[in-house]
Image: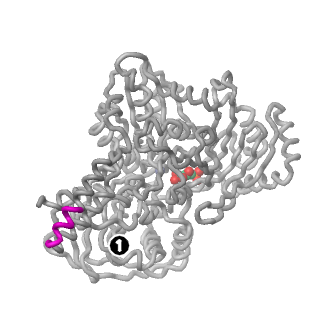
Amino acid sequence: VPHVGDLVSSHMHDLRIKEMVMFKVTRVETTPFEGQKPGTSGLRKKVKVFIQPHYLQNFVQATFNALGADRVKGATLVVSGDGRYYSKDAIQIITKMAAANGVKRVWIGQNGLLSTPAVSAVVRERVGADGSKATGAFILTASHNPGGPHEDFGIKYNMENGGPAPEGITNKIYENTTTIKEYMIAEGLPDVDISTTGVSSFDGPEGKFDVDVFDSTSDYLKLMKSINNLLQRHYSAVAELLSAVPFQFLIFIFTTFFILLFYLFDRSIFDFPSMQKVLSSPKFSFCYDALHGVAGVHAKRIFVEELGANESSLVNCVPKEDFGGGHPDPNLTYAKELVARMGLSKTHSEPNPPEFGAAADGDGDRNMVLGKRFFVTPSDSVAIIAANSVQAIPYFSGGLKGVARSMPTSAALDVVAKHLNLKFFEVPTGWKFFGNLMDAGMCSICGEESFGTGWLSGRSDHIREKDGIWAVLAWLSILAYKNKDNLGGGNLVTVEDIVRQHWATYGRHYYTRYDYENVDAGGAKELMAHLVKLQSSIDQVNKIIKGIRSDVSNVVHADEFEYKDPVDGSVSKHQGIRYLFEDGSRLVFRLSGTGSEGATIRLYIEQYEKDSSKIGRDSQEALAPLVEVALKLSKMQEYTGRSAPTVIT
Ligand code: G6P
Ligand code: ZN
């Protein structure tokens, strides 16, 4: 019999601590902090708020209490994040609180680093050496917000499906934070060394408690390469059976035979060899900027070690606690170095930019895609991935179940869905809304204007977060597919060619977003109230608009977006203010749900152009009339005191 354990799992570790350390449970008295309400994506505050005594502890205990003993006692919890300042301390605190609350195992990515999509993959896919599966995760990140002692920290909880906790749970967590009186923490449990992989075991009042520090990329990479992890799980169950009841050897052999059959028919998600070919072609060049976030760890392993990209393709790929002092948001304003390298900087001219460039945010779930001197809007990116996926990405060769976008994302995806006769969904901003659709097998690819793209499937074995590296692999696959015959001779089909061909087929959605960051919250609320009030008379709105620009079409409908989840019937109201125009143009106003200070107003502006002779204009120029209408109609300057946005994407 082969050494079954070796086949079953690559996570066998030596026990590092041979003598069991005993710990006790201490109850610490505390009082509530105001404002611990999780936003769009967890609780985000300045580090100075988080490091107040009991602040993090209150939130973590409130989460354990919201989950309830059933989900906490005996649980296996993943605790990791983007490595921002305070993460290392937070990991030790959460580990000790987990132990005290009866959690059985804590899994930590090496150095506490795991991208948000990698956490999701680990929750869904990883099998511990003892056959255990994770039941949830604390992700320590404030995503694309800056890090460092004077910047942001954040924490969010993901459930056993690998996706963010639903509102029912986050509301309960918040309620608990308002009444909390005590939290539990393990006394006598030493800090765990998270810099080297291995399992440490401790002894508590409820039995053994394990801390397993593991390789940050291997499970995620395995997922990208294949979908056979599900089978490994079965293997593990068989292995347990075998060791417990050796005489059932025959059953083992029988099951192994079927599993091997499954392996033979296993489908890759991506075609790694064809991506390798593109990356190693002398015609092709690549640049990846992780903005010093956690995606750098995965990028090195996947793009360089697996796919053979040159190490010099990687920029800012060493994670830093303060993201090198930058703003880890992959857009044209903050990804400065990539933007310059790709020949898109206004102040620096680059003689020979790479063919393909991409960036990620701090926790690796966002992506920006660039061609040589060319920006791909995230709304176009998801539409183009959807339009090419069946041919270019092996996992989708059987067809797509449906596609989805968030409301402010442009309608480029809608046109593809119509063309390909696919189910289509428009959900509110926030990745969690896609989760139900994918669990119900209604959607395969989804994306958002906020530089997020992801893939979902009705199968139960995939991640539940958007995924920056996935998006790059999807684009590499499309490039590989479009160039399968020209890497030897012929001209390379570039990123720009692919986008322009897409516009020629489906029409172009000119699109821009104006962000007014950290404005006075009162002023922002008043602006939104003013826009809602205007909606009561469309005639009046049209009169105002005609007074601003006569070349803009009429508003035909205006409302606040509301969503009824087709799976569970729940209704989400006040999800953004929309003005819809006769020619398909849209203006959308929203308050950001991810800021940590003041308010951020987002204004989304979109115009559809079907006429192929008009699809090549500069986007800011094409949108200028609508921008003027939006700013004047909303009285932006009056309410915010700002004459220009902080960021334009
Ligand atoms: C996070 C979520 C996204 C969402 C974005 C919106 O990144 O994961 O699903 O689109 O926040 O942020 P905002 O600041 O516009 O609320
Ligand atoms: Zn993020």
Q: Residue at x 32, y 81 (%)?
A: 25
Location of mark 1 (residue): 75
- The residue under the point 36% across, 63% down is 79
Callout 1 crowding tier (Cα within 10 Å): few <14, some 14–19, many ≥20: many
Q: Can residue 647 be seen in the rendering of this structure?
A: no
Q: Main secondary structure of the magenta part?
A: helix
What is the image's colouring? one colour
291 relative to 281, above or below: below
Position of 555 with respect to 505 (left or right) is: right
Q: Is residue 456 visible?
A: yes
- Residue 507, quarter of the rendered image: top right
Whether 7 is drawn above or below 390: the answer is below
- For this orientation, the residue located farthest to the left is 1
> Which image quarter is the C terminus in?
top right
Q: Which residues are magenta?
A: 246-254
Q: Is residue 136 above or below residue 373?
A: below
Q: Tell me where residue 433 sits by quadrant.
A: bottom right
